[in-house]
Amino acid sequence: MKLKVCVIFLMLLIAVSKGIPPYNGQPGCKTEEEIQVKYYRFITNKTLYWKCVEMGKPAVVERCPNGQGYLDPVKSCVDFRQWYWTPLINQARPPSEPDYQQGPYQGPYGSQGYYGPYGQYGPYGPYDQ
C-alpha cells in the first residue's frame, strides 16, 4: 500500500515538474464546430470564458463585465442574480485541445502572474515583522 502511494506521488511530482497544465476548458480551435460554437466555459473561474476567433489559432481568454459571470448554457455573460452553477459532468470537452508545446497556460494575468513583475511582496521583498 505504501509503495502504491509513493508511486502515485512520484508520478504527480513528475507531471508538475514538467509543467503539464491542468485542464481549464481551453478549446484548440482546430475544427469548424469550435469556430461556430465560438464560446467555451473557463473551468476554474466563473467570470472568464474562452473565445475561438480563428481556426488554428489558440483560444483567447475573455472576461465578463463586473457583476456578471459566464453561463455556458446560454453562451454569454449574465448578471450574477441569474447565474447558476452547471456541473462539469454535464459539459462535454471541446472537440480539440491546444498544443501545449507553445508553452504552459499563463492565465488571464499573463506571464508575470497575478502580482505583476515584482511578485507577491512587491519590489522591496517580503514584509519584515
Image: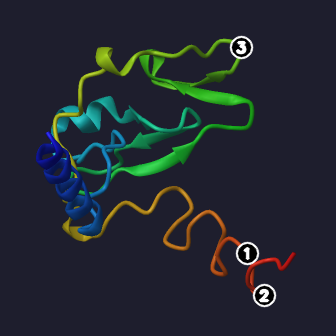
Q: Residue furthest front?
A: 2
Residue under numbered circle 3: 81
Q: Residue at x 22, y 59 (%)?
A: 15
Q: Earlier in the sequence, mark 2 or mark 3?
A: 3
How busy is the neighbourhood of tag 2: few (under 14 within 10 Å), some, or many (20 plus)? Answer: few
- Amino acid type, residue under disc 3 in the picture: Arg
For disc 1, the marked residue is 121
Which mark is nearer the camera, 3 or 1?
1
Q: Residues within 10 Å of mark 3 (few under 14, many from 20)?
A: few
Which secondary structure lies at badge 3?
A: loop
User: Marks 2 and 1: in contact by CB < 8 Å?
Assistant: yes
Q: Name the residue that disc number 2 marks.
A: 124
- What is the quadrant of the C terminus in the image? bottom right
Please state which of residues 107 and 32 is positioned toward the viewer in this rendering.
107
Q: Distance between the Cα atoms at labels 1 and 2?
A: 7 Å
Q: Nearer the viewer, mark 2 or mark 3?
A: 2
**Percent x, y of residue 71:** 51, 22
Q: Amino acid at mark 1?
A: Tyr
